[in-house]
Amino acid sequence: MAQTPEGKVKKKVSQFLSGVPGIYYYMSVPGGYGASTLDYVGCYLGRFFAIETKKPGARPTPRQEQIISMMRRAGAEVFVVDGTVDYPLEQVREWMTALANSCNTEPQK
């Protein structure tokens, strides 16, 4: 079965996150029950983060934008990774490295 364009982005994000020591993350599975959330929610070195994945060139829906805004107001670091280039995922890596440096731990590769 062929993977969707967004599925390819999710695979790349999952591969990256699974290689980060000491991270907790959860990939939500939409089912029509409970509150809406973004594709990934997690915690790294005591900081809450979320990632919304989109196919190349796509933007979050109005509902997703509302959730992003709510999470950011609560102090979360939120990223939108659209797979157009590696840079959006690089932003996640840079945030984790800066956080690790501020906590005097090893930066992530």
Image: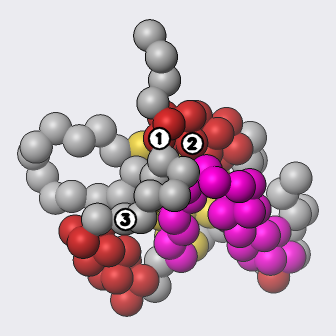
| Residue 56 at least partly seen | yes
Q: Which residues are magenta?
A: 77-101
Q: Write the residue at 30% across / 81% down.
A: 70
| Residue 100 at least partly seen | no
Q: Which residue is mark 1?
A: 6
User: Nearest the camera: 49 or 55?
Assistant: 55
Q: Is residue 69 magenta?
A: no
For the N terminus, the image quarter is: top left
Q: Which residue is mark 3?
A: 60
- Numbered disc 3: secondary structure: loop
Dominant SS in magenta: helix
Q: Amino acid at mark 2?
A: Val
Q: Amino acid at mark 3?
A: Pro
Q: Amino acid at mark 1?
A: Glu
Q: Which residue is mark 2?
A: 9
Give above or below for 35 relative to 83.
below
Disc on the earlier residue, 3 or 1: 1
Q: Which percent across, then down, holds residue 57? A: 51, 58
